[in-house]
Amino acid sequence: MNANNQSSLEGGTPTTLRLFIALPIPETVKSEIERVQNELRQVLPEKSVRWTKRGQFHLTLRFLGNVEASRVLELTSVLRDACSSFPALGLRAERIGCFPGLRYPGVVWVWVHDDVQQLGLLQRMTESAVGKFAENGAEKKFTGHVTIGRINGIKRPQTEALAKLAHSMTERRFGEWTATEVKLMRSELSQSGAVHSVLSTFPLA
């Protein structure tokens, strides 16, 4: 049985919740990201990519994995305290990239960043505050991004076409906004994919 679906003996209440912490993306930016997904569909075989749905566009600050339900109240308190001392920050979404790289693409993403390196500080602050709740260790390097698709396997011609399209979008911008809140999100796995819901919202100072 998946740990995310384990239930207590009383009433079927989940004993663990699959959680992550994220910054929301404005609807106008989501629309631009959907537009670039449609452009990518022209060069990538449909069955070779699992496209991220609009409702799942977000910028993950920390994926926690399965967290004991009994610890969520403590996690919420820690996050609220951390966010209350961090200022709102201006963000920009532009160009596309791939993990681990354009030569061997596995994940396609839109880059999100700011001009004064506050996003990296927010991520490190979040990591410091909630690291004890996470199943796995921290990322070695944080890159602000919105995942737009996961590639299952493409051949060289499609890889080259993807790289060419990515290079053509070096100056492409999808929008700017001010991030004013952080969200604690729950991810529930299903046969049709993950379903995300907001558990708590924490305003930035």
Image: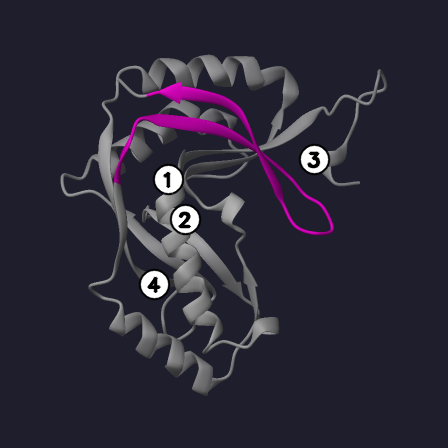
- Mark 3 sits on what residue? 4
Residue displayed at 70% across by 35% down: 4
Distance of mark 3 from mark 4, alpha carbons? Answer: 31 Å
Single out the mark in the foreground, 4 or 1.
1
Front residue of this view, candidates 51 and 2: 51
Three-letter code, disc 4: Gly
Residue displayed at 40% across by 15% down: 80
* Label 2 with label 1: CB-CB less than 8 Å: yes
Circle 3 crowding by C-alpha within 10 Å: few under 14, some 14–19, many from 20: some
* Label 4 with label 1: CB-CB less than 8 Å: no
* Label 2 with label 4: CB-CB less than 8 Å: no
* Residue 123 on image: x %, y %: 32, 34
User: What secondary structure prevails in the magenta region?
Assistant: strand
44 lies left or right of 101: right
User: Is residue 134 visible in the rendered structure shown here?
Assistant: yes
* Residue 91 on image: x %, y %: 24, 41
- Mark 2 sits on what residue? 30
Circle 2 crowding by C-alpha within 10 Å: few under 14, some 14–19, many from 20: many
- Mark 4 sits on what residue? 97
Residue displayed at 51% across by 32% down: 134
Q: Which label sits on residue 26?
A: 1
Which of pointers 1 and 3 lies earlier in the amino acid sequence?
3
Range drawn in magenta: 177-203
Three-letter code, disc 1: Pro
Distance of mark 2 from mark 4, alpha carbons? Answer: 17 Å
Quick one: SS at disc 3? helix
